[in-house]
Image (cartoon, coloured by chain):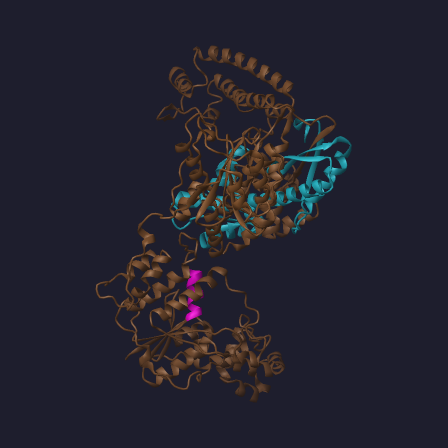
Amino acid sequence: MGWEQKKLSEELGISSKEAKAIIINYFASFPTVKSFLEGIQERVKIDGYVETILKRRRIFDYESANGMQKAGFLRESVNTVFQGSAADLIKLSMNEIDRVIHKEKLEAFMLLQIHDELIFEIKEADAEALSRRFASIMEKVLVLDVPLECSVSIGKSWGELK
Amino acid sequence: MKTITIIDTFGFFFRSYFALPPLRNSEGFPTGLLTGFANLVDSLHREHRTDYLVFALDTKGKTFRNDIYPEYKANRDPAPEDLVKQLPIAIEWIEQMGFANLSREGYEADDVITTVTKFAKAQGLKVRIISHDKDLYQMIEDGKVEMYDWVKGGIVNEQSCIDKFAVHPRDFINFQAILGDSSDNVPGVKGIGKVGASKLINIYHTLEAIYEDIENCGTPRIQKLLLESKELAFMSRDLVTMRTDVFADMDVESFVFEDKNYLSCLLDEFEQYEMKQALRRAKVGMEGLDCEREYVPSVKAISKSTLSFEAITLDSKEKLASIISTLHKDTLVAFDTETTGLDTKVAQMVGFSFCLDKTKAYYVPIGHHYLGVEAQVSLEDALKAIKVLMHCQVIGQNLKFDFSLLVNQYGLTPPLPYGDTMILAWLSNPSRKVGLDTLAQQYFKYKMKPFKEMVKKGDDFSTVAITDATFYAGEDAWMTFMLYGAIKKHMDLSSLSHLLKEAKEVEYPFMQVLLRMERLGIKIDPSKLITLQKTLSEDLLVLTQEIYTLSGREFNIKSPKQLGEVLFGHLGLKGGKKTKTGYSTNESVLQTLTDAHEVIPKILEYRSFQKILSTYVEPLLKLSKVDKDSRIYTHFGQTGTATGRLSSRDPNLQNIPVRSALGRSVREAFIAKEGYVLVSIDYSQIELRLLAHFSQDEALLDAFNQHIDIHLATSTILFGEEDAQAKRSFAKSINFGLLYGMGAKKAL
């Protein structure tokens, strides 16, 4: 927890003590989150890997790691579950949107992916409708126990977006 | 008194499987259970001496207990894949070492154990049962029969049974009859738990006694429960009572455990599975080998790869046709191209190679250019052949490159890859390198011919002699073919078969999506970049002068060495950290000094302007100039990260700063083509939603399902209603920070 404490105090410009109090309070308020995050780290020790939502694995050689590496593994294991699963979701979305664009020969092109964000080039007249449609594909790409939500932004340049 | 040890085999395997780390050999085959097994045999020699040894096994299929109660053991989860893989091997090893391996159809291992125990006791042997299964507690009898929990390392005797369940082993079956067992689906008496059952049993000892005196038996509620489940109670007792008649007779002498090194029978196997410790133990006392089989160290362990293939040049239309005509749609073809460069927008194909089996590979020269170049195949004939190839089951290493070349330069429409070794290797272990050379070394200890040895600096592949090119290119196709089989096998062995499916359903289609995106590029407005370049350059000039004035010295600001000397030497600022090359002047060092001297903020500003100029403005401008539509094209890396995130390079378009004004001005140069607009669609708080989904935390689930501002909700929970709004940013920081590393500045 020391590491989070340091980062949080730096980011919020508060004392390390205050940061610690916030973190303790957070985990006390969200005990399920705490045990879940600890569970991920336990799995790394036992299984030597974690899995994303599509069951992609990241392997950690926990047995032969030194202390510092072990601490890094625990952090990366949590990171991988979330970042990796998010990567899975957007990958599935991109496959599906690409399929729709080609099947229906839409005047829309998928140009870039910036992690959780997709950039399209869409015929001006169709932009509103198609972006809503693509957003809806993204929101339904997998059914989770919470809704997925997307924000849409339209502009002439990338700088105008959002 | 002699001792007989009876092993509850599957119980032991399960237990040691879960207790040991998930060991694997270099091929990825799990070896944890096998290691545990070798440890057991070894310790029977050293710590847990025994005179006789028996392994008791379950058989597949139904037992007599299913005739009593069809639902018996009906809700068992399937065993982990890794465990199932090792089981048959371990069982074979029992036989290889010459141990008795007892089982009988229709009975469980527990019945075998009980029967063996009966005979052993009759012959005056002390019985030690290696098991932690409470179903066997009924046999415990101090001085005669004890159990041993291998993983916890403790003897289980009458007292331990009483400590744990408050009943004596001799009353155990009647106790279980009431208690039931949810893991085996033994019903028992519904509503009576451990405490209630032990109380009853310690008064009455048997079911019969209980039901004879039912009107005095505990509270009215207990009586009612007992009466309701009377039949089930008796049936449950039948289920938990072990049988002693699995075998009519038994010769204990056939179970003798001799004083020899049984592990030496498994030398080859330990080597095969790379079980070093077991191998060492197996070699103890090798002079007089205790096993009939002769041990010859396997070649694999010492020598390097002896793999080889035949490289064949197909340098005429006819030769090419003679091979291509043998292909059909089910043929597995490893395919690779050789080109004049790595940018498929401009590179030309010099030749292509393919491989259909493990013994040879073909190379088709097309565009070699050197004095006295030998016969080659025309581009037209080559493309015709490639079109046929593309209808086969095409595999490759990084097919995105080859396919991108075929689309960009020759207008072909490549199929979905049948397999890509780079992607499979990455799925197998996303933290490792996935280049062909590395994989060849890793899977076959084979050293590939380095590209550098083939092509002189400044030249391209077209200058390579066709005979050399045939070996080099053929080797690539051949190794890809070999690796495809090896990696697939590795994935099967390491319980990763589900990722073969993921590759097919997600990664290969995704490769095509990325290929299209890379071809599309994104339009740049060069005039905006030129303006930005101009203002930044002017600003930098002004800053330079200011820095000179403030520090009282002219120096190269871009040189960390000179800067360090000026700041910590000349100006005498404190807090300088000496490194090998001088003082450290990285950003975090300078950040801590912002108030120490007024030159510091100027230097930070200088650095940020310089960075935007040299990392984004100038390279993007240069790239946009070479394209007729002013579009720039990034390269996406599908296998570039261990988490699975996509990467982008040449240029990297994923890391243009989002929040700074300068970053925004760079982004303003990215525009839509005429008549089009740019659209961004962004997942909001996706990681937090995943956290809610995975953790099932009620508060998080509720907040998202009710579309409440998650950070405010967190803030309310953390700081109370009144302070919630004011401290929302704290909550936001912690929400993001704790989940995926505080490094995720993007979110803040």
The residue drawn where x is 44% and y is 65% is: B87
Q: Is residue B251 above or below residue B730?
A: below
Q: Main secondary structure of the magenta part?
A: helix
Please say whether residue B408 is visible from this viewpoint: yes
Please tell me whether residue B330 belongs to the stretch shown in magenta. no
Q: Is residue B236 above or below residue B339?
A: below
Closest to the observer, B706 or B378: B378
Q: Nearer the viewer, residue B525 or B211?
A: B525
Taking the image as shown, residue A124 lies to the left or right of residue B647, namely right
Residue B155 in the image: x percent, y percent?
36, 71
Image: B544 above or below B505 = above
Image vertical order of residue B260 relative to residue B394, above or below:
below
Instruction: Answer left or right for B705 relative to B568.
Output: right
Residue B13 lies within the magenta run: yes
Task: In the displayed orientation, state which residue is furthest to the right.
Answer: A125
The residue closer to the viewer here, B568 or B379, is B379
Q: Position of residue B470 (x, y in %)?
A: 44, 38
Q: Which chain is cyan?
A: A
**What color was chain B assigned in the picture?**
brown
Write the start and end of the magenta stretch as one range: B9-19
Image quarter of residue B247:
bottom left
Q: Quadrant of residue B53?
A: bottom left
Q: Residue furthest bottom?
A: B212
Report whether residue B718 is seen: no
